[in-house]
Image (cartoon, rainbow, N blue to C red):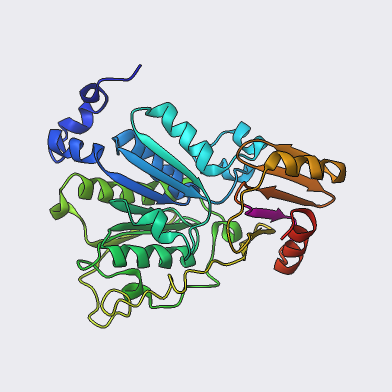
Amino acid sequence: MGFDFHQRYSRQIRFRHIGEQGQARIASSRVAIVGLGALGTASAAQLARAGVGYLRLIDRDIVEPSNLQRQILYTEEDARAGRPKAVAARDALLAANASIAIDAVVDDVDSANAESLLADVDVIVDGSDNFEVRYLVNDVAVKHGLPWAYAGAVEAHGTSAFLRPGRTPCLVCLLGRAARVGHDTCDTVGVISPIVQWMASYQVAEVLKYLAGQEDALSNAILQADLWNTDVRLIRMGGPKPNCPCCAKRVFAALGSGRRALSVTFCGRQTIQVRPERDAALSLGALADRLRPLGVVRANDALLRFETGDISITVFPNGRALVHGTDDPARARALYAQYIGM
């Protein structure tokens, strides 16, 4: 049995900057969240409880024990079962608010599918852990005139900004064309949960301002914080660069040819993602029967987990697989060909 709309959101409606009209706007809004790690789960929890009417949760990964320290929507049982993050997050959010619509997408965001996954929402929220995906989000946002909330957190440092095409710089304005490689990640230097929660809260506050029709309240600034040393800075952004290749000249380099990467390394994880050039339609049941004589198999409707020797492979129904136990893309693709078939 559902709860009365005004009862559920009474404290948010009483906040004078949102009110009845703002809450109605929030309830009719659509948001995509790219990545359901620490930032993505924190943002998703706040947006779902705030009453955003539709959430699309996108993540390619599964829940692991190391996620539980900071990724607030997951349980030990999710990690034991290796559940897809998008599915586990959806179930947790619907248990908190069954009155909203949530779509779980267990997949990459890449140049082949970025527009179909992101172009039909009101706001995109960045919960990713790499700049390759962020440049794709930026391209879609600029091309389709969509605002997006950027954030990153590592160690006790965090950065966040709400970017609006035509009003603020885009990511290419701020950082240039090339994706940043060789930067620290939580897998290499760690992260504490409080900085994640702060950056996610800043993201969500800006998103709620926009969705509630309160754009004059947007900060138009980059928040940078170091919680360990208690150092906080707000850097005003100004407008777009007049010669920006992306938002001025409308060259969408990240979207490129629309081809997807066939192998992707997960930093610090000894995990390689392998996928066919075109999505397949695998029968996980039939694959399980074929693999059982060769190792340990666990399967459900969402994924199949196969373990043999020092290697395990997580396979999804569209043919995408995570090969765990190697950081060599060539070996990962050879194992995929051996056990799954190219």
Residue at 33%, 40% in the rendered image: 54
Q: Residue furthest top?
A: 1
Residue 291 in view (yes/no): yes
The quadrant holding residue 299 is top right
Residue at 79%, 40% in the rendered image: 289
- Up-down relation of residue 77 to residue 185 (above or below): above
- Judging depth in this view, the residue of 230 and 89 nearest the camera is 89
Q: Which segment did they paint magenta?
A: 319-326
42 relative to 291 in the view: left or right = left
- Judging depth in this view, the residue of 319 and 101 nearest the camera is 319
274 relative to 200 in the view: left or right = right
290 relative to 151 in the view: left or right = right
Could you say where residue 21 lies in the image, as x and y percent from the top left? 13, 37
As for residue 7 lying within the magenta part, the answer is no
Q: Quadrant of the N terminus?
A: top left
Could you say where residue 248 lies in the image, as x and y percent from the top left? 25, 78
The quadrant holding residue 47 is top left
Task: Count up the numbered dots.
Answer: 0
Q: Quadrant of the C terminus?
A: bottom right
Could you say where residue 318 lies in the image, as x and y percent from the top left? 60, 50
Residue 230 in view (yes/no): no
Residue at 83%, 48% in the rendered image: 308
338 relative to 155 in the view: left or right = right
